[in-house]
Image (cartoon, rainbow, N blue to C red):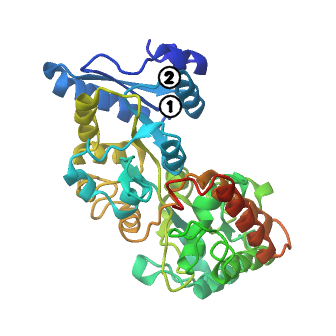
Amino acid sequence: MKHALYAGVALAACAMSSNALAGQLTAWVIDGDSEKPYFTQLEETFNAKYGAEGISVDVVPIPSYNDAIQAATLSGGLPDVIMLDGPNMASVAWAGTIRPIGDLLDPAIIDDLLPAIKAQGTYGPEEEFYFVSPYDSGTILWGNKALLEKAGVRIPTGVEDAWTQEEMAEALEKLAALPEVEWPLDVKMNYGAGEWMTYGFAPFAQSNGGDIIDRETWIAEGTINSGANVATLTTLQDWNKAGYIVPASAGDNKFYGEKTAALSWVGNWMWPAHREGLGDDLVLIPPPAFGDAGPVSANGGWGWAVPSSSTNLEDIKVFLNYAMSSEQVAAYADTTGYVPSRASAIPLSETYGAGGAGEIFAKLAECCAIVRPVHPAYPVITNAWATAVVNVLSGDVDVKAELDRAAQTIDQDIADNDGYPPFGQ
């Protein structure tokens, strides 16, 4: 019944009001099929544990989530607790929509967060904690063992023996020579010029010593168009020209469906499709070391935040600490397939604990994940970088010119907003 109340964005914005009665919390969450069973469990177990103390929560999946949050922000109808997508947190915090939550979380929980998860939730020059995610995501090379073995390619098993850039180039050349292989590497160009191009391709640049903005000065010039980034994208462009990369027009299933691609660079959300498609031939390979920084994995996901309008803070504190308990974080991971965000929760996870099928994902999240820039200009930063990546991998364009254009776009936006104070002060 409660789900029907939120069928429309406008209705969702009007149906909820901030500052609910003491003890009666409402939390808006994303409306994903893989997350629904977890959120149902979260609501039931929290209410069973704290109902006798007069605290309960209504966990409400919201369709068209971002639109609903925007509408509720404008109407003053945000609930007690919301979920946000990690990369969007900084712009929401800068707008004043959410409050710091460091005083609401047990310090032991914050100390236990994986490094990149902690960085994802930390905002501004004062480094206040605004956001906490129960999980992390990551990128990895998925391989077709049968094709790799037929091509005589070494299969790395851990971060320590990851391919170098040169080894990966040799592997692609050998795989391309197999008659079964049409394009050896799928990097999900079919995802288009969206967030994937930053999530998926910034790790290559960071592995080679680059980044997409200077995280001290918050100036893009000299960083996004650095020599390291030009070299990284030129290598990817050369692989594309050589016919190694699945083009966008080829669709999504060359690796796990047709099996005419031998490798796929994508996140853990593709695990079910890959497992079903390749069965025992599926192998998980650490990200390649493009440079001296070694393998780098992407990071980030949806997490908990508290609107500035919320006043029921003592009860919210109880809810947040329950939702971020080691047991709940492990339950989120095993229900949804994402990596637990707390070090103490990883051993509790059947998938990501020692010997689990996803152990390598957990190790990458602990050692090698780099958070996307936590800055209010992130929407502009990611769009500029994504545009450059798509252009570089779509034609014979000048890599340096594309990155120069991205730098100019980002720096102009930051200048137009007076540096997004308190950043730049």
Q: Secondary structure at mark 2?
A: loop
Q: Secondary structure at mark 1?
A: loop
Vertical relation: 90 (above or below) 294:
above
Residue under pointer 1: 31
Q: Is residue 8 visible?
A: no
Residue 423 in picture, x, y percent from top left:
51, 58
Is 197 or 416 nearer to us in this picture? 416
Residue lying at 39% horizontally and 64% vertically, measured from the top left: 365
Vertical relation: 95 (above or below) 18:
below
Near mark 1 (Cα within 10 A), the count class, few <14, some 14-19 or many ≥20, is: some
Q: In the displayed structure, does residue 329 sit left or right of residue 79?
A: left
Is 46 or 409 nearer to us in this picture? 409
Residue lying at 83% horizontally and 76% vertically, measured from the top left: 398
Furthest residue in direction left, as rendered: 52
Please tell me in which quadrant of the rendered image residue 7 appears. top right
- Residue type, mark 1 in image: Asp
Question: Residue 76 got which mark?
Answer: 2
Residue lying at 71% horizontally and 60% vertically, measured from the top left: 412
